[in-house]
Amino acid sequence: MAARVYIGGAAGFAGDRTDAAGPLVEALARLSGPRFLMFETLGERTLALAQLERRRDPQRGYNPALERFVGPVIADCLRHSIKIVGNFGAANSRAAAESIVALARAQGLRAPRIALVEGDDLTGNLSRAEFAKREIDGKILADNAQIVAANAYLGAAPIAQALDQGADIVVTGRVADSALALGPLMHACKWRNDDWDRLAAGTLAGHLLECGSQVTGGYFADPGFKDVPGMADLGYPIAEVDVDGEIVVTKPAGTGGRVDRLTVTEQLLYEIHDPAAYLAPDVVLDVTDVTVEEIGADRVRVSGARGRPAPETLKATVCIDGGFLGEAEISYAGLNAATRARLAAETVIARMQRRAPGLRIRTDVIGIVSVHGDSAGETIARAWDTGGQKDVRLRFAAQSMRRNEVELLLDEVEALYCAGPAGGAGVRRHVTPRLASASCLVELKFVKPSVTMLGEAT
């Protein structure tokens, strides 16, 4: 049983910095004891995009940045026995694992022992009728909605099992973000699956790590209010966890960012709806008695997590065919630019009301109203008087189950080159197939996690 376990959080989302793992591995290599490198790269939107990619190519559907995340550090991780755990498998964990094997081979490394954690895919376990009975994000699944994929949030036990079987690298699909840290802790500390307070502490450690640099100053930074040094070289977090569940959050020496009571508290409260009952697959976490204490430069101790028995259901993400998103943009610059852009918008909307009367169109004028705009158009109607804005980018967007309907909108925007106000330029247009993602709860009996060592069944 390990006295202290070290886990580096090398990624907080699919598009995170791919050079963040290097300083973490260097720091972990200097330590003794169980060490793990955790990649959290899978959000609901990311999984939906991966499902689309797998539909187009059965060999894809995993995180496209996998090679850039793992490639620079795999040799050092194998050399120093630093285990890698990541949910970059997304919709195709097996293909992700095969990609890592090829990566190791290309670098002349020994073949790593790779474990696949599967069983999150529910499409073979629940019928469409079963899904239709469930409330999905507060609504009953519509009769005409086509379910493309449904994935349950697995817990930490399969990850711990994979590490118990000697895996160097564990590749998962949809698991709870915190499970990526709790699994290694259960393995290294030999925690029982009903040791609720320790499981709660491990879940909290995973929660603090799961967004990568958010706990070391990224996303936290707000100049003049919450200053963060070295944003271009942010250090990503390391959690030091002892066998009783006390956590110390830190970062590699010499890296940018900050780790203090403020950064850790902000991340601790991130996405927690009920501080007394944060639901995870393995435990219900209570953070109401948690203490956050600075014990040194860039070292914060977190303790006091309490746990209650795990829920009897798991969250599942359901991906539904969302039709098509059409987007088109055009620029107006110089004197009277905003007025010309307004005329262009009014022209397109008037024509679309005749050509596709039911299509709901969102209009943004980047430089005036975009972030706080709304599809109904009320915000932009109040914001056209810009006081002489001389450079605007006009954007139109619409979603429909029928591709030809959104193509009509894009055609109208492109026609503004000659049939619109003076000076329109730089039209770009794009149609994207969409999946809508929603959530529901599923009973444990429908979820059957499995662990497979690549090349052998277990």
Image: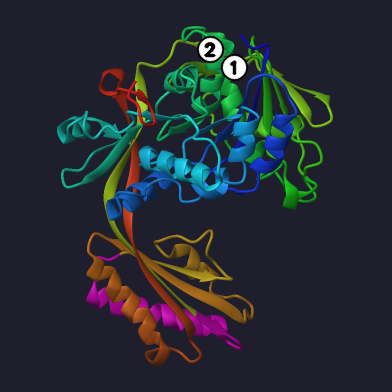
Q: In the rendered image, which residue does mark 2 sit on?
A: 307
Residue 361 shown left or right of residue 382 in the figure: left
Disc 1, SS = helix
Q: In the rendered image, which residue does mark 1 sit on?
A: 201
Indicate the amino acid at tag 2.
Gly
Q: Classify the position of the C terminus by image quarter.
A: top left
Q: Nearer the viewer, mark 2 or mark 1?
A: 1
* 368 to 319, vertically: above or below: below
Percent x, y of residue 251: 74, 34
Is the residue under label 1 in contact with that under label 2 (CB below 8 Å)? yes
Is residue 352 highlighted in magenta? yes
Residue 317 shown left or right of residue 104 in the figure: left
Can residue 275 be seen here? no
Name which of mark 2 and mark 1 comes first in the sequence: 1
Indicate the amino acid at tag 1.
Ala
Q: Which residues are magenta?
A: 331-359
Q: Classify the position of the N terminus by image quarter.
A: top right
Percent x, y of residue 414: 38, 82
* 160 to 22, vertically: above or below: above
Residue 361 shown left or right of residue 295 in the figure: left
Q: Give the camera-side residue of 149 and 55.
A: 55
Is residue 350 highlighted in magenta? yes
